[in-house]
Image (cartoon, rainbow, N blue to C red):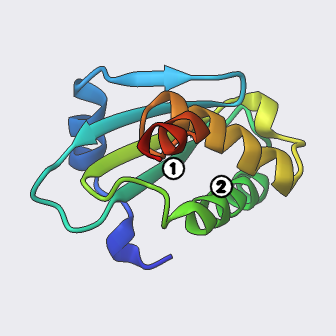
Amino acid sequence: MRKSFRVKKETEFQKVFETHDSVANRQFVVYSLDKPEQIHFRVGISVGKKIGNAVHRNWVKRRIRQAVFELKDQIRQDVDFIIIARPTTDMMSMKDIKTSLIHVLKLARLIKSDDDSEDQE
């Protein structure tokens, strides 16, 4: 995923956190901030020190980033969001990470749920 799709600066992270617009499941917490003028979404990923050493945390971040990349066509474009990995993501498979991420992004209304597509037909 290109760097233009990432929230990188501390001030940008804080703007998203200050909205207090968050949802969570057992594996992830997602904070979101609507930005109507934006042409594509931006995502920030945070993995705390409770999840292994630096090498393992980066491994978890890469898997989350890959799952977001696979879902990019379904994600709303006018939003910045932060994904915080909880310690339970430590030993999850790629498939489980993607499934859990889809669940929490649907709760945050950042991607379409199956119910939404049925309503439109």
Residue 99: quadrant of the picture: top right
Work out whether 6 lies above or below 31: below
Say which element carries label 1. strand
Front residue of 73 and 87 = 73
Work out whether 49 lies above or below 8: above
Q: Which mark is residue 64?
A: 2
Residue 33: quadrant of the picture: top left
Marks 1 and 2 in Cβ contact (< 8 Å)? yes
Residue 19 position in % (x across, y down)? 23, 25
Residue 75: quadrant of the picture: bottom left
Residue 41 position in % (x across, y down)? 33, 59
The residue lying at 38 percent from left, 63 percent from top is 6
Residue, disc 1: 45
The residue lying at 71 percent from left, 51 percent from top is 57
The residue lying at 24 percent from left, 54 percent from top is 78
Front residue of 105 and 12 = 105
Q: CA distance from mark 1 to mark 2?
A: 8 Å
